[in-house]
DNA sequence: CACTAAACGCAATTGAGTTGCGTTTATAAT
DNA sequence: ATTATAAACGCAACTCAATTGCGTTTAGTG
């Protein structure tokens, strides 16, 4: 992703442009699957942010709806860039029980569900599929 | 749930019957919503198991398909009794953003999804709805 | 150029869950 | 009924992802 676009994204979210955050967004964009803080740190290497700063940046991105965050069963958060602008998820996720990788199933849309008739107000929806990914099956 | 039934459940799962595990199963059955270890400990009070023993019992129940385990967004596991016998979930869960409570939406069935055409083998499915429960809306 | 709020890094802390290990108990064989 | 043994248990110590405190740096506006 080009720098100009990243500047625009950060500015629109009311956040400052810094080299570290730009690298973070670019990396998430390139990888296009949910990543842990550890994976991000490894991917950014020396050019990247401190562990704490990564969490803080991701938190503000989450608030702004720039990324989504998932828990895939191991109590480790994974973050993926998602331009959808809402804090909810717009597609299901696939979790491979063999390699542990998580993917965004962007081609699948979430079903429209209304359970308001029973008094529930549904604001967000998360759908996870677990099994074997194409590489492991 | 009567003692005889609990004995049968544990025996069928290849587990020993102990007062602690019986109390644990009975409590999960009565409460019929996903509970944290802390909630279980509070619920069982003096008559219950040690924290470690609760986790170990729940782990073996999970293996046996007696309970299911969910992560509802706060990195804290919740366990619910579920006689369905499979390790996957058979219904969606609702997470209230106001009171934090989690409920099993046993009346809603999960949609049948097949993504095998793209090389994915789907073994389990988890669906979470987030929003406001009837008490909070 | 100066000022201020946001961003950053380091060290220390939190807390859910786990591990090690010695003791107790359920259950099946004798 | 007694014994053997594998499972279940409790305590203390540990792990590790994530958070907090706090002082420093930097972006971006006036």
Image (cartoon, coloured by chain):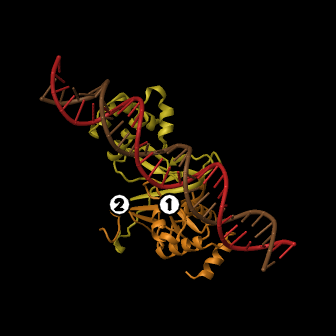
Chain colours: A yellow, B orange, C red, D brown
- The residue singled out by tag 1 in the image is B70
Nearest the camera: B22 or C22? Answer: C22
Q: Chain of mark 1?
A: B
Q: Residues within 10 Å of mark 2 (few under 14, many from 20)?
A: some
Q: Secondary structure at mark 2?
A: loop
**B101 vs B4, nearest the viewer:** B4
Number of marks present in the image shown: 2
CB contact under 8 Å: marks 2 and 1: no
Residue B48: % across, % down:
53, 69
Residue sitting at x 38%, y 35%? A53
The dot on residue A104 is: none
Residue with the mark numbered 2: B97
Occupied quadrant, residue A130: bottom right
- At horizontal 60% and vertical 49% (from top left) the residue drawn is A133
What is the quadrant of the C terminus of chain B in the image? bottom left
As measured in the structure, the alpha-carbon distance from the residue carrying label 2 to the one carrying label 1 is: 16 Å
Q: Going 37% across and 47% down the picture, which residue do you hit? A: A84
| Disc 1 element | strand
Quarter in which the N terminus of chain B is drawn: bottom right
Which is more N-terminal, label 1 or label 2? 1
C5 is higher (above) or lower (below) than B98: above
> Could you tell me if residue B119 is visible in this image?
no
Q: Tell me residue A27's x, y (percent).
A: 45, 34
Q: Position of residue B104 (x, y in %)?
A: 46, 69
């Amino acid at each position: 992703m080009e720098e100009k676009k990243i500047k625009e994204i950060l500015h629109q979210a009311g956040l400052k442009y810094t080299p570290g955050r730009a690298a973070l967004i670019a990396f998430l964009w390139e990888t296009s699957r949910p990543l842990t803080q550890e994976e991000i740190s490894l991917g950014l290497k020396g050019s990247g942010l401190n562990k704490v700063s990564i969490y803080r940046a991701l938190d503000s991105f989450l608030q702004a709806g720039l990324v989504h965050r998932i828990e895939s069963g191991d109590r480790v958060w994974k973050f993926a860039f998602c331009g959808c602008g809402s804090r909810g998820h717009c597609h299901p996720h696939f979790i491979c029980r063999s390699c542990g990788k998580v993917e965004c199933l962007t081609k699948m849309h979430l079903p429209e569900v209304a359970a308001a008739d029973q008094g529930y107000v549904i604001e967000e929806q998360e759908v996870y599929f677990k099994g074997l990914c194409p590489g492991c099956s």
